[in-house]
Amino acid sequence: MNPDKKIAFEQILELRSAIIHHDYLYYVLAEPEISDQQYDALMRQLIELETAWSDLITPDSPTQRVGGAPVSSFEQVRHSAPMLSLGNCYNVDELRDFDRRVKELYENEPEYVCELKIDGVSATLTYRNRTLTQGATRGDGQVGDDITTNIRTIRSIPLSVSDKMPSDFEVRGEVYFPSDEFEKMNAQRISDGQKPFMNPRNGAAGTLKMLDPHEVTKRPLRFFAYTLLSDDIDLESQAGVLETLKRGIFPTNPNWELCRGLSEVEAYLNRWNEARNELSYETDGVVIKLNDIRAWNKIGSTAKSPRWATAYKFSAENVVTQLLDVTWQVGRTGAVTPVAELKPVLLSGTVVKRATLHNEDEIARLGVKIRDSVEIEKGGEIIPKVIRFIAEERPVNAEVIVVPSKCPECETPLVNDQEEVVSRCPNWQCPAQVKGRISHFASRGAMDIDGLGSKTVEMIVSAGLVNDAGDLYSLTVSQVENLDRMAELSANNLIKGIEASKTKSFDRLLFGLGIRHVGKGAARVIAECYPDLDALSQANPDDLQTIPEIGEIIAQSIKDFFQFPPSIELIDKLKAAGITGKQDEAVSIPQTLAGKSFVLTGALENFTRDSASEAIRERGGRVVSSVSKKTDYVVVGANPGSKYDKENKLGVVVVNERGFIELLNN
Ligand code: IVH
């Protein structure tokens, strides 16, 4: 090798190992040590050297993660060993049955490894000579799609490994979408006019199916490894596998535990059933595996799933009840959505009479009919949902669910919004929409008007006292105190509450206006750039789009709003009441937390997650989802999640709720 080339070669090796190290710190440990700019500079230097000395490029260089042109379809690959799925347990009794069966076959006291069940898409990665050669989906368990080019874009997956790993092996695990990235992507999709993904799992599956690896790079997928297959090492235990994978610099989920006996397993389940809400990714249960790998063969598998492992599903609270009817609800945007009216049933300790059916597509997907027995589930959401009907119990008089052609509130013929698979009532004056818009304006995340819940809105709209949110500000005590069920005291409170809302911040006002596609996040960024309603109403869509979070759809929607006669009327009324969005310097809050970043974990007594975040932001601080070196404070409530364990190592200040309140008041 000539001397120049030799120097270049050494620099290339050094840069590669630095980049791989920083990828590991960032993507696997979530503890970055350098800034994005510093990282980009390393990458640039490497690209420059590799461009000058192209014969030194190797496929495992970090510059080679995205390669090749889009493909037209994926090749099929047969798995070296079937990729099984898992049997499910929905309650502790079923778990005890599993444990009993294991004990019979194992003829020993079993130790179990409990792992979080990551709600993603399983994939298998093949390494030959310690280099990643293939990535494939599960497919039907025997044959999957070769998605190597897409897998290579996932930065936490090593393209080559050290001799801590055997030469030839296969790693299996879950590809998933981190929750915050998922939300960002969906917001972007909405602003680009695309249909959002239902959940992070669909997002991950949809991404892995994309044919152009350049598109996949834009979607920051992650990976957790949990299975290792290799003829070259003796794998004794699942705990050992997880440790080997971790040493081999594979990302593994840190929250696994070795449990001796079922009571330790149950404690793990209970703990994570709560703490999972604090994670930065979704988990839908716990996988319980017999730790002793050498016994797996003897215990064996059914055609679909192993007998030495099971999945415990968190949403264990599923019940079957009867679908009595489907009613159609008209929202503030006119969207008409189906609601399942159920025979009342106890679920997670509350009586449930209604559940959501989402939209017309969902009804078609479920194939459900009126009078069917349906299984309902309470997931993370507050409103339970119908997840399936019980085919064996379908009565002969089951009735097809008919989508109405007229608005159930005002009888205006509905129009079909093709793109959003929803029927809409086009009548702006539809009473359901009028009430919905006012309720939204008064809601907690918007103007937060005390005393103005949906029942009161119903009353004042039906009495003809208000027609839009602007009318609220000319309401008088004498007008409302005569309404049914409105005593003088609450009439007074209502008017006071309305008056007090006049000084709410511009982002709240903006969100409260209910402009299509302008959610809380968009309202916040817009309010940072425009001081008040007047300024915003003058903005043209191009100006608006210079805000990074604002795309064409949101910008156009804002413009349309300010030109729509009923909104012009609303804004005139608001202005007449002195509401312009402009913040009086005197009422604005001192920026005592400017530049500070916070992580919230666990439940607080005096705050919801939203209100705590808002209190921080109002004072100039930021709320981030996971702890890193850049985090200043971790606020720890009851039952803190895993975020809590990390910060001590990082020297972050930990405060409890009292300390947090002191920080806010300082
Ligand atoms: S072990 C034979 N461990 O759940 C056992 N699976 O219904 C193979 N999953 O197809 C799977 N997290 O996609 C295992 N920690 C974990 C998992 C996990 C998520 C998924 C995986 C599998 C499905 C089983």
Image (tube, grey):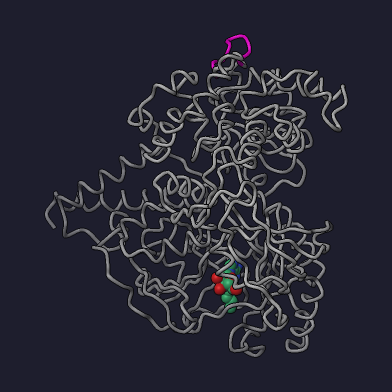
Say if residue 549 shows up in the picture.
no
Left or right of residue 650, residue 466 in this image: right
| Residue 80 x/y as whole percent | 44, 84
Q: Residue at x 27, y 68 (%)?
A: 71
| Residue 42 x/y as whole percent | 31, 43
* Quadrant assignment, res 434: top right
Instruction: Using the image as rendered, state which of residue 390 and residue 186 is in the foreground.
Output: 390
Answer whether residue 530 is magenta in the image. no
- Taking the view exactly as shown, the residue that stands out farthest to the left is 2
Q: In which quadrant will I find the N terminus? A: bottom left
Q: Residue at x 59, y 51 (%)?
A: 407
Q: Is residue 552 above or below residue 416?
A: above
| Residue 354 x/y as whole percent | 74, 58
Magenta span: 581-588
Dominant secondary structure (helix, strand or loop) of the stretch shown in magenta: loop
* Quadrant assignment, res 442: top right
Instruction: Using the image as rendered, state which of residue 96 and residue 91 is in the foreground.
Output: 91
- Taking the view exactly as shown, the residue that stands out farthest to the top is 586
Left or right of residue 30, residue 126 in this image: left
| Residue 288 x/y as whole percent | 68, 72
